[in-house]
Amino acid sequence: MTTSVVITDTSVLINFLVLDQLHVLAQLKEFDFSVTDHVRAEITEHFPEQLQRLNAAFEIGSINQICVTDIVEVRLFAELTTKGLGIGECSAVAVALNRGITIAIDDKRAIKKIRRLGYNLDTISTSELTVCLIKAAILTVKEADNFKKIWEEEYRFKLPFSSFAELIRPTSKE
C-alpha cells in the first residue's frame, strides 16, 4: 500500500490535539501526516498544552515537520500572506500546491479564496479524516460522535450533521 503525504493545517491538527487523539491519525496507514514549521509555530504561540502533545508525536514519528524553504513554496507563501489568510494556512497551502499533496484543512472560506486565486487544492477535512478512521475500524461511530460532541461543546467546532453514522455508507450488500 502506498501512502499519501498530507500536510496538516493548524485547525485540523488542533481538533485532534485538544482531544489528545493525534495518535489515531497515525494509525491511518494510507496517510503520512506532516506540518510546516509555521503551523508548529502557531501551536507554540497559542496552544501550550497541545504543543506538548505535538512534540510527543514528533518524538515517536507519528507526524513529521516540513520546513518551508523551497523557493517556489516561499514565493507562494509570500503571495498568500497578502490575501488575508493565516500564516500557518499560507505555509501549508504553499507546500500542498508546490508538492501536489493533500492539505487537511477545515476553513471553507480560505479554501474558496485559494480556489478563486486559480489554485487547485486537494483537501481533506476533520470530518472526512474521522470517517476514514471509522472505516478503518480505528474508531467506532460512538467514539467519533463523542469527539464531535466535545468539539462542539468545548471548542466551538460545529459539524453539519448529528452523527458520523450519517456519513458512513454501508459496505455490505443489503
Image: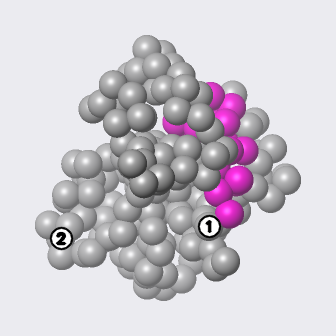
Residue 42, image x and y in percent?
Answer: 54, 44
Q: Can residue 48 be seen in this view?
A: no
Direction from residue 81 to residue 6 in the image, left or right: right
| Disc 1/disc 2 C-alpha distance (Å) | 30 Å
Residue at the spot of label 1: 30
Q: Residue furthest left?
A: 116
How dense is the environment of label 2, judged by Cα within 10 Å: few (below 14), some, or many (20 and up)?
A: few
Q: Looking at the picture, which amino acid does disc 1 mark?
A: Glu
- Residue that appears at 39% across and 28% down: 163
Q: Choose top left, top right, bottom left or bottom right for residue 20.
A: top right
Q: Nearer the viewer, mark 1 or mark 2?
A: 1
Q: Is residue 151 above or below residue 61?
A: above
Q: Is residue 121 visible?
A: yes
Instruction: Identify the element where label 2 is drawn.
Output: loop
Numbered label attached to residue 117: 2
Residue 116, image x and y in percent?
Answer: 14, 66
Q: Looking at the picture, which amino acid does disc 2 mark?
A: Leu
- Per the picture, the main secondary structure of the magenta-coloured stretch is helix
Nearest the camera: 90 or 147?
147
Image quarter where the N terminus lies is bottom right
Q: What stretch is highlighted in magenta?
A: 12-29
- Residue that appears at 37% across and 62% down: 123
Nearest the camera: 4 or 121?
4
> Which label's residue is closer to the chain start, 1 or 2?
1
- Residue that appears at 66% across and 44% down: 138
Residue 173, image x and y in percent?
Answer: 42, 54
Q: Which residue lies furthest to the front in this view?
A: 174
Q: Which residue lies furthest to the bottom in this view?
A: 71
